Amino acid sequence: MRVPLCVLLGWLLAMPPVGVVWAAPPGGAATQDDSVRIAVVPLRVGGGQVDEATRTGWVAGLRRGLQRGDFTLVEQDVADRVGEPGCERQACLDALREAGATHLVRTGITMKSRDYLLELELVDAGSGAVIFKSQERCEICGVGEVADLLDSQGALLQTRLAVLGKGPPVLVLDTRPSGALVHVDGEVVGKTPLERPLLAGARKIRVTLGGYVAEERELTFVAGAREEVVIELQRTPGNPRQRALGGAALGGGLALFGAGVALLALDDLPFKKRCTGTEVDADGDCRWLYNTGWGGAALAVSGAVLVTLGIVALVRNRAPRPARSARVLPTGLGVMARF
């Protein structure tokens, strides 16, 4: 039987090379990334006592979230045996690293009645550097809701670890109040709220808004990291002289207002203790009365105006509030700042 040349060539091209076997993964399932092994260290719980069953449920929720990625998790009994709550000592990091962990998750839960504050950190087991940090509140929650929230936070951590090193870093910046002009390395890039990709490396971020003190931060950005920064702006310090004048106006206004009220109270009252004879009218009232109504009203109105002006001057020229404590959260080679 003769086979056409074009058919023979098609067969030859369709055949796999010698020694090569084509095989798809069973069920198309993705393989785990064994180069990253995450250990969940024992929880650090403050503000109250929880039983072992609750702790186990919370850890299980966190592990469920972490398992949504392609990373391998260190067996929990191993992490519990060699780790410790917080795992901040170098000895703890070394023990987990010897157990095979490349990263660890530290979890702090603070309880107040039925309100919970959850703080999670993804840490490099080799250097001890915090790669990512998240903080969430759960108000009027049950222990099951806390487990669900830990699930979602665990998924967030593994997602951020998965994108680390992929794509440019992204700055997500907002100010309170919003509308501030944003400068990156001296170049205007927009107004807050702002979301913008940047080049990896150290960057100087400066925000300015009329009537507020300019704020400046130096942050280091890592490829693939999404850095979220919120800055509370402080009002521009007022003029000390204007504050002094405002204080004087407030004090003088209060004095005038008090004098006006006193004169209004005296109006139509007799200024003689005893009135006799012709000093008494047909109704038996003394003819010698204080006539201070108009003067008292004028003083009270003037005092009220001065008090208002003084308060306005003090408010407009008040000294800035003490700066709130700022938290700068390291993210591996980068930084996430909360203010």
Image (tube, rainbow, N blue to C red):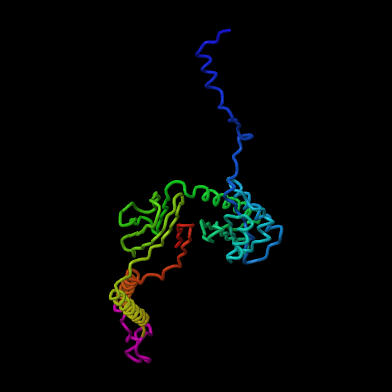
Q: Nearer the viewer, residue 147 or 244?
A: 147
Q: Quadrant of the N terminus?
A: top right
Q: Quadrant of the C terminus?
A: bottom left
Q: x and y percent of residue 252 in the render? A: 31, 79
Q: x and y percent of residue 118 in the render? A: 57, 59
Q: Is 275 included in the stretch rendered in magenta?
A: yes
- Image side of residue 243 versus residue 118, left or right: left
Residue drawn at (43%, 57%), measured in percent from left and top?
Answer: 229
Q: Nearer the viewer, residue 228 or 92?
A: 92
- Image side of residue 26 versus residue 206, left or right: right
Magenta span main SS:
loop
Residue drawn at (42%, 52%), measured in percent from left and top?
Answer: 172
Q: x and y percent of residue 103 in the render? A: 57, 55
Q: Write down the region rendered in magenta.
A: 270-295
Query: Can you tell which quarter of the image residue 286 is in?
Result: bottom left
Q: x and y percent of residue 281 in the render? A: 34, 85
Query: Can you tell which quarter of the image residue 121 is in?
Result: bottom right
